[in-house]
Image (cartoon, rainbow, N blue to C red):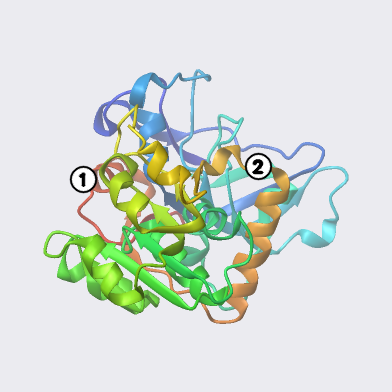
């Protein structure tokens, strides 16, 4: 089969190789998927680059955790009726050297989710990391019916799904912050009722103008180091700040008493550390929201498998709005 791999950390153009590898066979409890589209996440490029000293546990690694395709073989203890099933894949590379940047990938059967008929392979390949991160950020601390939700980075991969899942989950008011008019239009398209360009407006002042002094029940954050003071001012009493990034800051100074007096919670979110139950709940709700027509999927760029290095560079540039995917068929 054709595949892309790396044998050491480094820049995409220097370490990613394209060529032939042996086709994998499913073991007990596994399914093999003919990959149609492979999705790239920032965490995939960080793993490849050795970001912050990340170790390379395998001599050869096929990148990418997310993807979509068709099951073509199953191992023992998996129903053969799953053969031919269209699926989206999450965390293929978790505890494995073999991700979705290949013609075929083998994953535990529970990581291959039946794909709703309304989704194409490109949309399915973009669900895993961003949609599951968004789901956990929004719902891990209980229902959000009639709640107020603030999403920082509303045009980012996670932010877009956080807005849409919050709306699907019954949030009363959804606000988003962005850095440009183009991104504001995207956040609006995804369902944010109010969008604030933080380069042009004071976020705290504007949010309070919209919702008053009560605050936000949930805050989904992509840059905690930059936003912690804003969040502390805007979080509601007993509210939750859920953050999945710090803006690359290894340490963040916390306004402890400002949070304490509100009994506010600060939750860190790493999709790879979520419990099995949290993954199952996320996958179930993502599929249901898809069937309900509640999710839009924005694909920024398509690349062929042999141009995966260029695709990684596109992700690392931070200039694109939407998902970067690899078309394998």
Picture quadrant where residue 236 is located:
bottom left
- Between disc 1 and disc 2, whose residue precedes? 2
Mark 2, residue position: 106
Picture quadrant where residue 142 is located:
bottom right
Cα–Cα span, label 1 and label 2: 30 Å
Q: Residue at x 53, y 20 (%)?
A: 58
Mark 1, residue position: 317
Few, some or many C-alpha atoms within 10 Å of disc 1 (few <14, some 14-19, many ≥20)?
Answer: few
Residue at the farthest right position: 77
Foreground residue among 256 and 41? 256
**Visible in this render: residue 115?**
no
Relative side of 201 to 87, left or right: left
Residue 1, compared with residue 195, is above or below; it is: above
**Which percent across, then down, holds residue 294?**
52, 78
Q: Secondary structure at mark 1?
A: helix
Labelled disc at residue 242: none
**Visible in this render: residue 256?**
yes
Q: Residue at x 84, y 50 (%)?
A: 78
Relative side of 53 to 162, left or right: left
Residue 252, compared with residue 163, is above or below; it is: above
**Which percent across, then down, holds residue 263?**
52, 48
Residue 127, compared with residue 62, is above or below; it is: below
Picture quadrant where residue 206 is located:
bottom left
Few, some or many C-alpha atoms within 10 Å of disc 2 (few <14, some 14-19, many ≥20)?
Answer: many
């Amino acid at each position: 089969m054709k595949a892309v791999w790396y044998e050491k950390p480094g820049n995409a153009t220097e370490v990613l190789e394209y060529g032939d590898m042996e086709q994998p066979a499913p073991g007990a409890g596994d399914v093999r998927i003919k990959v149609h589209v492979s999705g790239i996440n920032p965490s995939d490029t960080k793993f490849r680059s050795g970001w912050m000293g990340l170790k390379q546990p395998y001599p050869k690694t096929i990148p990418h955790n997310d993807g979509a395709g068709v099951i073509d073989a199953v191992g023992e203890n998996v129903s053969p009726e799953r053969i031919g099933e269209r699926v989206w894949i999450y965390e293929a590379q978790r505890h494995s050297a073999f991700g979705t940047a290949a013609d075929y990938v083998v994953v535990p059967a529970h990581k291959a989710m039946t794909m709703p008929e309304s989704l194409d392979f490109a949309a399915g390949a973009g669900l895993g990391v961003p949609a599951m991160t968004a789901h956990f950020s929004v719902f891990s601390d209980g229902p959000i019916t009639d709640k107020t939700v603030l999403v920082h980075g509303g045009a980012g991969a996670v932010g877009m799904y956080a807005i849409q899942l919050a709306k699907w989950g019954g949030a009363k008011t959804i606000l988003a912050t962005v850095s440009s008019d183009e991104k504001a239009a995207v956040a609006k398209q995804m369902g944010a009722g109010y969008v604030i360009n933080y380069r042009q407006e004071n976020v705290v002042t504007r949010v309070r103008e919209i919702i008053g002094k009560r605050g936000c029940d949930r805050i989904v954050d992509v840059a905690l180091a930059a936003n912690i003071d804003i969040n502390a001012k805007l979080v509601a009493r007993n509210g939750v700040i859920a953050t999945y990034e710090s803006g690359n800051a290894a340490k963040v100074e916390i306004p402890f008493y400002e949070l304490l007096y509100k009994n506010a919670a600060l939750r860190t979110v790493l999709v790879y550390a979520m419990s099995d139950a949290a993954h199952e709940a996320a996958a179930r709700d993502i599929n249901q929201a898809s069937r309900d027509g509640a999710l839009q999927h924005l694909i920024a760029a398509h690349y062929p498998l042999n141009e995966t290095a260029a695709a990684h560079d596109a992700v690392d540039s931070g200039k694109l709005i939407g998902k970067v995917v690899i078309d394998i068929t």
